[in-house]
């Protein structure tokens, strides 16, 4: 059975629209590749970070709600940690 998750992704603010779209597509592909489904994607705003991350002082926040099997979360996190466009990510399990 799939669980509900909420993912917060901070992407670099100095990227072009095409590179941002490519990073979001990678996130979507990883979720669907593991038989998951995305229910909602929200782009928050460009925000100043509380502290520099990899020498970046601003980031673009995305909130993605999705369902996927619990064993896929570690694989998704590992694959996304290799993407240099993503500064930080956090995935939380939601109650049904």
Image (tube, rainbow, N blue to C red):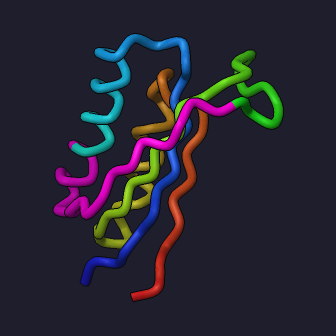
Estimate the x, y position of residue 51 in percent, counting from the top left: 82, 32
The quarter holding residue 35 reads bottom left
Q: Quadrant of the C terminus?
A: bottom left
Q: Residue at x 51, y 59 (%)?
A: 91
Estimate the x, y position of residue 8 in percent, counting from the top left: 52, 51
Estimate the x, y position of residue 54 in percent, counting from the top left: 71, 21
Membership of 34 in magenta stretch: yes
Residue toward you, 65 or 93: 65
Q: Residue at x 29, y 69 (%)?
A: 67
| Above or below, 86 relative to 96 | above
Q: Which residues lie in the magenta part?
A: 29-47
Membership of 70 in magenta stretch: no
Q: Residue at x 60, y 39 (%)?
A: 88
Q: From this viewpoint, which residue is outermost toward the front?
A: 45
| Left or right of 21 in this view: 56 | right
Residue toward you, 72 or 66: 66
| Left or right of 89 in this view: 77 | left
Residue toward you, 19 or 83: 19
């Amino acid at each position: 059975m799939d669980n509900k998750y909420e993912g917060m992704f901070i992407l670099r603010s100095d990227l072009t629209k095409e590179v941002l779209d490519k990073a979001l597509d990678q996130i979507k592909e990883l979720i669907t590749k593991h038989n998951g489904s995305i229910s909602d994607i929200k782009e928050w705003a460009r925000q100043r970070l509380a502290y520099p991350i990899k020498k970046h002082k601003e980031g673009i926040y995305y909130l993605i709600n999705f369902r996927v099997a619990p064993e896929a979360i570690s694989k998704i996190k590992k694959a996304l940690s290799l993407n240099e466009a993503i500064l930080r990510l956090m995935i939380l399990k939601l109650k049904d």
